[in-house]
Amino acid sequence: LFRNTKVLQEMKICLCSFSRCVIVAWIISICTVSYLSVIPTAELPFDFRWSDKLWHCLSYLWLSVLPFFGFTTVRKALTAAFLMIPLGFALETIQAFVPERFFSVWDMFANSFGASIGIFCGRYLIRNR
């Protein structure tokens, strides 16, 4: 029984470390997306007709799925993930005032769609863990 308790404590410590790493990665990701959203020009690694919308969608999917692996409760994870939608709106609005950038409702839609997919995937993965 003593060994099992020790193993459980070690697993808890390991899980806490993993959660902290995920939260740090999430914060770095938010900073990166925010920075790339407000600089005058951002080069995309590949370019096709809707590549910009794909990048928006994937970025916000990433930002909204990470909280489900970093926060200790589903409620906190959902709150953090849902906050990515107003973040996308705010950053897109700021782009209206940045040289060489422009405001786009379609980008807002792509951000929100990506965040919604991330929330759905995060909840699904947490339930089936």
Image: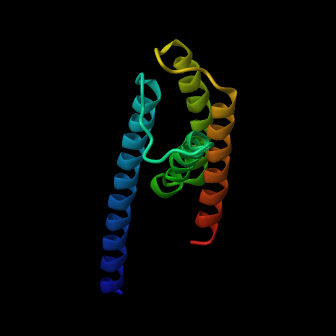
* In the rendered image, the vertical position of residue 68 relative to residue 98, given as above or below: below
Q: Which of the two residues, 41 or 86, is positioned nearer the viewer here?
A: 41
Which quadrant is home to the C terminus? bottom right
Res 60 → quadrant = top right
Q: Position of residue 113 (x, y in %)?
A: 68, 44
* Picture quadrant where residue 55 is located: top right
Looking at the picture, how far across and down is residue 58, in whole percent? 55, 49
* Residue 116 place in picture, x, y as percent: 67, 47
Name the foreground residue: 19 vs 113.
113
**In the image, is 31 to the left or to the right of 113?**
left
User: Residue 20, position in %: x, y?
Assistant: 35, 52
**Colour scheme of the rendered structure:** rainbow
Residue in the foreground of this view, choosing between 27 and 15: 27
Label tally? 0
Residue drawn at point x = 53 percent, y = 55 percent:
68
At 59% from the left edge and 58% from the top edge, which residue is drawn?
122
Q: Residue at x 38, y 65 (%)?
A: 15
- Looking at the image, which residue sits at the far front? 48
- Where the N terminus falls, by quadrant? bottom left
Kindly identify the residue that appears in the image at 35 percent across and 47 percent down.
Answer: 24
Report whether 95 appears left or right of 3. Answer: right
